[in-house]
Image (cartoon, rainbow, N blue to C red):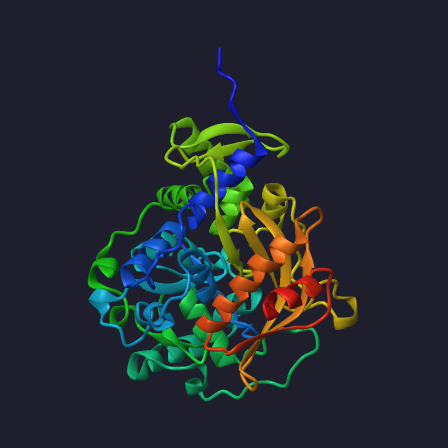
Amino acid sequence: MPCSPQRLSAAAARRIALAAQGFGRPRPAKPPGTRQIRELVSRLGVLQLDSVNVFSRAHYMPVFSRLGPYDRSLLDRIAAHDTPRPTRRLVEYWAHEASLIPVENHPLFRWRMAGVDAEAWGSIRRVVRERPELVADTLDLVGRQGPIRASATGIPRPEPRPGHMWNWHDGKVALEYLFYTGQVVSAGRVNFERLYDLPERVLPAEVLAAPTPDPADAQRRLIRIAAAALGVATEPDLGDYFRLPRADSKARVAELAAAGELVEVEVAGWGAPAYLWPDARRPRRIDARAILSPFDSLVWSRARAERLFGFRYRIEIYVPAPKRVHGYYVLPFLLGDTLVGRVDLKSDRQISSLLVQSAFAEPGVDTARVAAELAAELRLTAGWLGLDDVVVRRRGDLAPALQRAVRS
């Protein structure tokens, strides 16, 4: 007779998840070095990239949230186009969304590269079908001139189209097809514009020579990385971490559970089967304090954030301004093991200030304590970004207390 799954309280699951994401230990007393940054990215498995830069580039924030102030050039260096191949430790690919991943994990996505017709979006599938000569010429151009920007293809950008977020010309689409299929790779970014080059000029030799894993084996390894990074998770959580097709996610999770590599558990209030990573830490207390990017792997799944923290979260960048509830670029505030508030932040370089456009507290929190802790974290963040001041505007129920705390 099969045993019933072990049961976890919602609070225990939340602490397990936070520890797995790197919030289970105090920040280092000294600014972290390259080794600590590499270890963190290896633990998380992925740093999502995003073009919005009103506050800070998204991929910088998860490291700061967990390790505190650090030299951002260290992260740039291990992912930069001028890093020697043997010492390059991060590379970009479509992992969650566009993301930095440990370079040794690049072969785990070859099944995605090979499955471009099923996996990729319409425009890059269409370009190879309708303009194969453009794709071939673009690959030849990268071989001769790489690393190149999309502008090097010489194809002008089309007129903006209403409702279209990306305004790509055909040369950029051809480069994106080649990038998706692994025929070119990202050699880094300059002013956030991707540089494209041949894999043999970017990836370490041992990564190039690594045998292509069977797709199911590669997906199982990705699920293992996700499970270790999440601690405890539902099957959709695990599959979404690296955007596996749902049928593949279900199959791989079932296989790992049957093999004992994932432990099925019941989490109070979740309403869905969950899976525990066997080596996950189970701390009795979490004493974290962090502002979280909207693209942080702790909260990028809004359904999981609500399940873990009771925190309803929506990014409102694309919501018309009059309809926004909390603001344009809103970041959750983690205190202890709870999301206690949210702030809309902007880095204003002209006045060298971190602007708090709005600040809201979650129901039932100690507003004075939250304001004091948030003020301290905002001052730390401003210093890390090279800003001289924190300016709080009076929007949101937390704003008055936060203004007082910042002034004091």
Q: Nearer the viewer, residue 361 or 62?
A: 361
Q: Residue furthest right?
A: 322
Please provide percent x and percent y for residue 69.
41, 65
Q: Residue furthest top?
A: 1
Q: Is residue 176 visible?
A: yes
| Residue 31 location, quadrant | bottom left
Q: Nearer the viewer, residue 200 or 295?
A: 295
Q: Residue furthest front?
A: 408
Q: Nearer the viewer, residue 263 or 27?
A: 27
Instruction: State the quadrant of the C terminus.
Output: bottom right
Q: Residue at x 53, y 40 (%)?
A: 14
Please provide percent x and percent y for residue 37.
34, 60
- State left or right for residue 220 relative to residue 201: right
Vertical arrangement, residue 70 with respect to residue 251, above or below: below
| Residue 148 location, quadrant | bottom left
Q: Residue at x 37, y 73 (%)?
A: 188
Q: Is residue 243 visible?
A: no
Q: Please count the marks in the image.
A: 0
Vertical arrangement, residue 303 with respect to residue 156, above or below: above
- State left or right for residue 38 relative to residue 333: left
- State left or right for residue 402 relative to residue 257: right
Q: Residue at x 59, y 57 (%)?
A: 332
Please provide percent x and percent y for residue 202.
28, 70
Vertical arrangement, residue 324 with respect to residue 167, above or below: above
Q: Residue at x 61, y 44 (%)?
A: 309
